[in-house]
Amino acid sequence: MCPTLRSHDLSAEESLLEPPIPNQSSNSKSPLSPSPPIHPFSVTNRPKKKKSWDETYTLESQNFNADPANEGHVWFSESDAELRILSFLRRIAPEARSFLDIGTGNGHLLFEIVEEGSWDGGLFVGVDYSDGAVALARSIAKGRGVEEGKVAFWVADILALGDGEVEAEEWVPRGGFDVCLDKGTFDAISLGDGRLPDGRRVYEGYAERVVRVMKRGGGLLVVTSCNWTEEELKGKMLASEGMVFANEGIELEYHGRIEYPSFSFGGQKGQTISSVCFRRK
């Protein structure tokens, strides 16, 4: 299932109070996560929905402990999103050496990337603002026998990144990530009706935060959504062609899309989900 946008009935504190129900799928094998210390990120103004996510992942951890084959939900599994993302990355980023999964949850997408083997020796990092999600991902990594240090999971809130040097964050590599992945996280953030200090909706500050951990001159961001069309995602991420972030001349540009089976209804053609790639200039 896909979380439904409700633009007027959730306050900043209430958004994601009930975590959207992701698609169910049994998880396959893969390698994963070391256990670096939990990063002390601030989660300002979002305590209630964070608590809700923590409770969700605590339950999934209990299920996993009872049955290691049950690793939890896999978002957009009915559309084979992860397989299509992998195929896309093999084509556009064969030389990538560092990957960030934003809102990693149980870490399944990173497991798939590592197990696929095309980027052996790379840096694989998953961040989530839910302590419960990170604990689950680390447990799954240990259960899969993933070599320690192969994949790292950190408690971190991408929206809480300050204006200082992001490389001061232990999970950000020098120069930033080659590839950043978002599979449903922007959808979840979009559910909130909270406002930034400048009056914008919270999700409207997403791109300017993420771009700061992307490598200059070619870092990629792949956003997969079931709530926004391709054109809407372009509008949300770019705001307008040539938008400058943080007054530093940092720009994102459209770089490609992932094809999914389409359907027609009322003379209109569309997809149930969209995956769009952006590049940092």
Image (spheres, grey):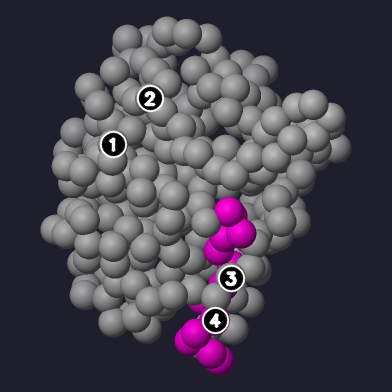
Question: Is residue 84 covered in magenta?
Answer: no
The earlier-in-sequence mark between 3 and 2 is 3
**Residue 140 in view (yes/no):** yes
The earlier-in-sequence mark between 1 and 3 is 3
In the figure, is residue 249 to the left or right of 186? left
User: Which residue is at the front of the view, 76 or 239?
Assistant: 76
Disc 2 and disc 4 in contact, CB within 8 angstroms: no
Q: What is the CA distance from the residue labelled 1 to the residue labelled 2?
A: 9 Å
Question: Is residue 77 covered in magenta?
Answer: yes
Q: Residues within 10 Å of mark 2 (few under 14, many from 20)?
A: some
Residue in view at x 54 percent, y 15 percent? 239
The earlier-in-sequence mark between 1 and 2 is 1
Disc 1 and disc 3 in contact, CB within 8 angstroms: no
Image x and y of residue 271, in percent: 64, 39
User: Which residue is at the front of the view, 188 or 163?
Assistant: 188
The numbered disc on residue 92 is 1
Q: Amino acid at mark 1?
A: Ile
Q: What is the CA distance from the residue labelled 1 to the residue labelled 3?
A: 27 Å
Q: Magenta segment range?
A: 66-79
Which residue ends up furthest to the bottom in the rendered image?
66
Image x and y of residue 156, in percent: 43, 50
Of the 4 image quadrants, the one containing the C terminus is: top left
Residue under label 4: 70
Disc 1 and disc 2 in contact, CB within 8 angstroms: yes
Residue 8 against residue 133 in the figure, above or below: above
The earlier-in-sequence mark between 2 and 4 is 4
User: Which residue is at the front of the view, 61 or 263?
Assistant: 263
Image x and y of residue 175, in percent: 19, 33
Image x and y of residue 44, in percent: 57, 42
